[in-house]
Amino acid sequence: MKPAGPTTSPDRGDPAVRRASGPGHVDSGRLAGVDAVRGLAVLGMFAVHVGPGARPEGAGFLIVAADGRAPALFTLLAGFSLVLAQRDRDPAGGWTRRYRPLLIRSAILALLGVFLASLWPGILVILAFFAVYFLAAEPFSRLATPLLAAVAALSVVAGPLLSFLLGPVFGYGTSGRGLVPEAADFTSWAGLGRVLCELLLTGAYPLATYFPYVLAGMALARLCDVRERAVAGRMAVWGTAAAVAGYGSAWLAAHVFGSRGRLLDAIAVHHPQAAAAADPVREVLRGQYGAVPSTSASPGAGRLHPSA
């Protein structure tokens, strides 16, 4: 039961944290658009795990579209949902009421993630990483909306750069990335160090490159009231424009300005085993996943996934 009395938040006037009210209004508590996009992300992850290989032919085209993008979309929605959940939070409830559910949720996710990864299911389990995302997001949830939006924008640039620059510092210059924590890693101090590095920097879904999605989702939830159809439509248009700009600029950098040739030269030096593959760049990125490889600083070397 919700505690009696008024509730407040740093952005109590934000449209995303206001409940619509008025005579005759029925609020189901669900946002159809958010649920639909979340369902699309979940279906995309199912398709990647149980569908055919991600190849640019036949049904493989659909898998290419989902591979790497579905978890990114799901992560963005996680940040979006965190802000929506704040509207039912009682900030006067004390430390226990505020943090205990977060700690319990994160602990359950971490335990499930480590357990499932230890079964070697043939997929990269994201749950342990989600536990870290939720813990890391809590301090940012108390920022004012303009500051949160600025931090989100900065993280989109800074996160991949940190992954690129710090990988070699921790001994992951050209290999050893894209792993997930397993139970066996917790049996030694060296293993614990690897787990920490995987969660933050070098794993399959590390904080450095995936947490910007969480922050972006939080900022979007503060700035946009998706219960209004016009707002949701504008978000779809601007999202499409951003995707075209991002992928278009990557294509221009690779195929018009020659960065792909520089990538292939770097791969021949640092990853000779991949040089004979049909697509050497994809072959290298296949083993890097969410971490940004440090093979080359040329545009296109730091994509989050082979198909991204």
Image (cartoon, rainbow, N blue to C red):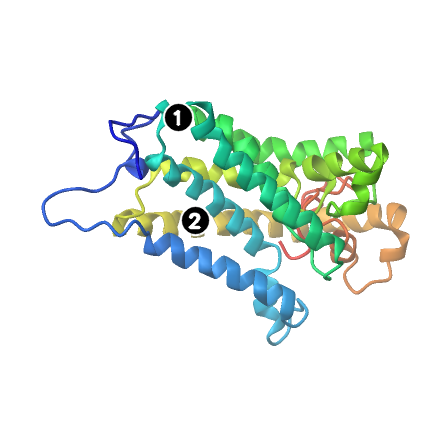
Q: Nearer the viewer, residue 146 or 134?
A: 134
* Residue beneath the point at 44% across and 29% down: 98
Looking at the rendered structure, the kind of residue marked 2 is: Gly
Mark 1–mark 2 Cα distance, whole angstroms, equals: 20 Å
Q: Residues within 10 Å of mark 1 (few under 14, many from 20)?
A: few
The numbered mark, 1 or 2, whose residue comes first in the sequence reads: 1
Which residue is denoted by mark 2 in the rendering?
239
Residue 211 visible to an observer of this rendering:
no
Query: Residue 257: horizontal and vertical position, in percent?
Result: 67, 47
Query: For this rendering, which residue is in front, 169 or 55?
Result: 169
Residue at the outermost front position: 1
Q: Secondary structure at mark 1?
A: helix
**88 over 111 or under it: above or below:** above
The residue located at (81%, 32%) in the rendering is 170
Residue 166: x, y in percent? 75, 31
Instruction: Please name the residue shown 57% across and 47% down the image.
Output: 249
Q: Residue 146's mark?
A: 1
Element class at badge 2: helix
